[in-house]
Image (cartoon, grey):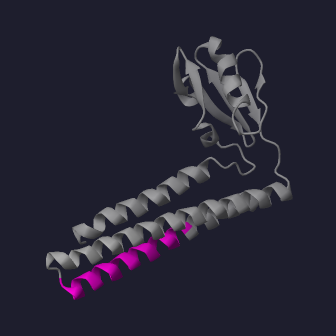
Amino acid sequence: MDARLEQYENKMKKAVEFLEADFAGIRAGRANPHILDKLRVDYYGSPTPIQQVGNVTVPEARIIQIAPWDKSMLKAVEKAILTSDIGINPSNDGSVIRLVFPELTEERRKDLAKEVRKKAEDAKVAVRNIRRDGNEAFKKLAKEDVSEDEIKQLGDDLQKLTDKYIKEIDGVTENKNKEIMTV
């Protein structure tokens, strides 16, 4: 692969990876510990991911259990969950915190599917913007004694990369929608 295309492919790959990470945070009726990835707890003055202050387990399909190694962290973990946008009230029994996920209603599933489609469309826009930036950079190469045929070939290759990553985004989106709509 041409080195001039590589940087654009890396950017497109990052856009897809970002989308996948974003999708991991969308809960689909089952307990998924990744929804806690963005939450930070004040651990002795520094914001720390919940996974680094205790064990995060999924004992049942719709329950996440958080057992802090330091029991004094229970209140801080509980507060972090309450102030987040997860939308689930934690239950604290003095040694562990449990998050019980309710079954998603049909309406909520449709809202989540709509949110997934919007995030996917944003990722596609990002990939297309990367393509545009690449094409603009290739047009400037004409001033550097690069032939028109070579510039056209770079543009064609960039379009193939764009198509590949758009298709990958569609696949990731379809899988997430299936996950959300499965009761």
Residue 74 rendering spot, x and y as whole percentages: 67, 18
Residue 132 appears in the figure: yes
Residue at x-position 69% and y-position 58%: 115
Q: Could you say which quadrant of the image residue 43 lies in?
A: top right
Residue sitting at x 59%, y 66%: 121
Decide: is 153 above or below 95.
below
Quarter of the picture containing the C terminus is bottom right
State the image coordinates of residue 4 (x, y, percent, origin top left): 25, 68
| Residue 183 makes an appearance in the image | no
Residue 90 against residue 116 in the figure, above or below = above
Measuring 85% from the left and 54% from the top, which residue is drawn there? 105
Quadrant in the picture for the N terminus: bottom left
In this picture, residue 8 sits left or right of residue 148 = right
Q: In the image, is residue 2 above or below residue 11?
A: below
Toward the viewer: 132 or 106? 132
Quadrant of the rendered image containing residue 100: top right
* Residue at the top extreme of this rendering: 72
Is 104 in the magenta?
A: no
The span picked out in magenta is 147-169
Q: Relative to residue 92, is residue 145 drawn left or right?
A: left
Q: Main secondary structure of the magenta part?
A: helix
Residue 152 highlighted magenta (yes or no): yes
The front one of 91 and 38 is: 38
Q: Is residue 25 above or below residue 174?
A: above
Q: For the image shown, how many numbered marks are present on the structure?
A: 0
Give how far across and how far down residue 110 sits, in percent: 79, 61
* Residue 39: % across, % down: 60, 33
Residue farthest along the left direction in this orientation: 145
Horizontal side, residue 18 vs residue 64: left or right: left
Q: Residue at x 69, y 17 (%)?
A: 75
Q: Residue furthest bottom?
A: 149
